[in-house]
Image (spheres, coloured by chain):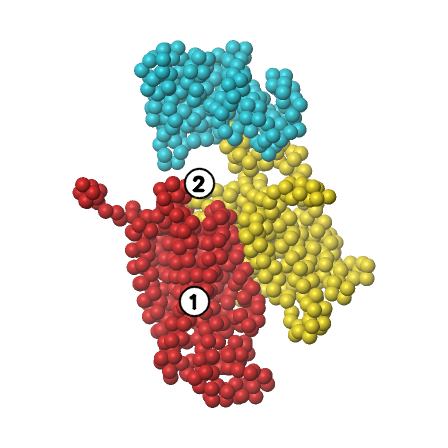
Amino acid sequence: MAFLEVKSLNAGYGRFHILFDVDFTVNMGEILVVVGPNGSGKSTTLKAIFGISTVYSGQIIFDGEDITKLPAHIKAKIGLAYLPQTSNVFTELNVEENLRMAGYTLPPEDVEDRMQEVLEIFEFLKAKLKDKARTLSGGQRQLLGMAMMLMRKPDLLMFDEPTAGLSPKAARDVIDKIIWLRDELGKAVILVEQNAKLGLEVGDNALLLVSGRISFKGTARELLENKDLGKLYLGLAK
Amino acid sequence: MGFLPNGTFVMASIAYASALGLLSMGLSLTFVTTRIANFAHATIGMIGAFVLTLLVDRVYYTGPSYQIFITAPVLSFLLAGAFAVFMYIVIMKPLADRGNGVTELMIATFAVDIILINILSYLLNAIRGVHIPKLIGLNVSSWDARIHCCGVILQASYIVLPIAAILLTLAFHFFLTKTKFGVAMRATIENPDLAEVMGVNTNMVYTVSWFISGGLAGVAGSLLAFSLKDTSPNDSALIIVSVFAGSIVGGLSHVYWGLIGGFIVGLMEKLGTGLLDNFYNQLLAPALGWTSFSMINYEKLMSLGLVVVILLFAPEGLAGVDWGKYLRKIKRRW
Amino acid sequence: MNIEFWIFSDTWLILVLSYFIVTLSLNLEAGYTGIPNFGKALFVFMGAWAAQGIGIRLAALFMQHYDPKDSSLLVERLNSMLGQNYHSLVEAAGSTEANRIVAPHIYDFLFAHPALDITLFIVILLVTLGLAAAMGLIASYAALRLREEYLAILLLSFSELVVMVIFNQTDSLNGGPKGLWAVEFYPDNRLFALILGAVISLLVFIYAERLGNSPMGRTMRAVRDDEVAAGVFGRDVAMTRLKVIMISSMIAALAGLVYIEAKPSAQTLTFNRVIWTFFPWAFLILGGMANNKGAIVGVLVFMVLKRFVEFYVPQMAAGHSAAIQMLAAYLSNIIVGLLILLVLYFRPQGVLPEKPSKTMDLDVVLEETK
């Protein structure tokens, strides 16, 4: 059985129905890349899984348990993590407070240890512990956001366009970290990526969303090589 | 300098300003957390005044006692805080979940205000054994201990109120910066969705913010009741306007600026009007032969003036002013 | 049901008519354009003030000018009676002590001179509209700059503070806590108010209905729903808001004029936020935003329910102990508050929800543009 299983999910915001009958699965040690044109419901998919958009029907099964109806803060506790595209760190808190917030659900005695472990991975943060997060650059914020996800040692990590607006080098840093999460730690990852080529190169499986419906499901390689879909929706003209 | 007001008046003004500061701070708090502008806020403070009256009538009826300065604020904090939580969980949150917008929620707080004023008035009449529905004053100021100091006689509440305001603000600051839940509250104020994603039960944060807000109002109301002569629950209708003026001056976007705004408005209303009155009637009018007239009825004109000035020059309130820019300018000059 | 309940007093009917006018004007602002005006009481008060503090003085001025002999006689008698030293009738009419004594004489003078009476009425109508427009201009300064909830709070504070300052101020503005008697234009002042209220309500309703379906009405909705988009499609968002605030401020002030004609001795604090801001909002929410018929239905349903509560709750307590009778007096207010909460809980869309605005049939448009 898959680690995360999404069954005929219908979701949106209030009255605005955006996702229609979306099904997919993600396994441990695997990156699922979600691509598609603007407004096709990529971000909504992540929010629906996490419970911060409205789910009308369908099921979300995480590690054998139905979590569809759980509030978001409980999902954070049981091992899901989500990095929003924007506003993904608390700009008015300093870096240390941000990391402590990220460890909100941990037992107090573990927070220090986890913080040290995370700071070993993201070394540049050590010098900035007392700085407010709004003083960080875009790429640094994105990495701080990832560090915050790791504080809780989640099993499923969901990234919403983590490379948007970053320089090629900063984007590469972020993507390398995501690959490392899969290969070294064996996490399950869902990666929503605007830059389809970059995403599909690192992904194992891929999902193409168009107008809130799945129009392709398979391995990332298949989609990358599918000339029609690539040209039509992803700007992969070659 | 014959026009300077005496010490008692200055202390009374500072006490009133401190109470307004606490009220404005609480108002701003529930506004930044739940986006609800609570028109019942001053009446929630009146719960404090009610608690004080109850204590004076039933416990300390023999005469002034310093003990009341501990029991009244503590009980008021708990009771007013409990009412605020009740209001949030039973009334405001269900209404918000039904899809009511900002303005509808404001109307709801108006309705709560009417209900609470009438409940308090009824209880007060019932407790005092009055069986006709009339406004009766709390009349508790004579139970306030008197302090003889530096040649003036002060009501003890004039000193207790500013001290309480300072202690509560420090405690609140400690809570926001040094406790895990307080940091979570700041995080929730900035970005509720992200806080929720981090595992914060934001609804719990909102509930606690209502408790603190109501509690602060209760303390302010209980201690202010000492210095308001002949006040009744209906007076909250007048006080709330100054409280909102304070929050507007502060900018409604930041808790501490609410405190400062409330303090400034309170000080201007009492001390500002008093100073102006003395200045005109004792210096200007005699010197120029103009007729003297009392300005004491015009204290609300001060808050109106402040609100208008803020509207014209800093629509986002004092919190929206780029103070850093002015500081740098001043530094460059020097 | 008790027959007494259905005999509505003329003051009740006039209050309902005033509420029609205020609620329709609030609907233009809040319902159609999305401006949360929580300062309605101030604009309503402008109409009352025009007839009270300003109107009675103007009337005294008219009398002084056209009937100097009687006027000076009246002032003399007044001075000897009160031991005061009023120099003119205008001064006497504007002072709290003498106002109640001279007002009936001024009324009689006006009733005896219909031409002056009508002129004065027109002047006061203009003063009402002018004052309201001035206040509307101030309010629009805020409305063009601030976001929703902040604007609502600011307008509320502004309105309360202005009314409170005028209330606390003795003599020169509006007679302070006691208030000045307003000028009356017809011997049966309530009948006059009833007719005036009915005519204005009808005119305002027709105007609001036409406006709602006009291009201006569609612009207003566009500004409400998406300010940026409205701007992008070439609508002047700021101008639309300014116009709507000015128009509805003037309409609201007419409600104050109608009300004060029925109750010429009303105090300044009668124009407080509960009665003239909060209730109209409740009517509008009950009836349905952006729907003029809804606004009317909202006023009627709510006012009848309110009357029901205020009529029957004390009746049920009658004959019981004094404590229960006292409880009943407070209980009717509490029930009115609960009623509003229930309305908010069960009817977020109102009794009559907003209808799409009337536009030309697409086929017709296509036909014409061929």
The chain holding disc 1 is C
- Which residue lies under the disc numbered 1? C128
Question: What label sits on residue B97 in the rendered view?
Answer: 2
Per the rendering, the colour in which chain A appears is: cyan
Q: Toward which corner of the image does residue C6 lie, by quadrant? A: bottom left
Residue C337 in the figure: left or right of residue C82: left
Per the rendering, the colour in which chain C appears is: red
- Mark yes or no: residue B124 visible: no
Whether callout 2 and callout 1 share a subunit is answered no
In what element is the residue under mark 2? helix
Q: Residues within 10 Å of mark 1 (few under 14, many from 20)?
A: many
The chain holding disc 2 is B
Q: Which amino acid does label 1 sit on?
A: Thr
Q: Which residue lies furthest to the front in this view?
A: B333
Q: Which residue is drawn at 66% across and 28% down?
A: A130
Per the rendering, the colour in which chain B appears is: yellow
Q: Residue at x 70, y 66 (%)?
A: B278
Which residue is at the front of the view, C94 or B116? C94
Which residue is at the front of the view, B300 or A109? B300
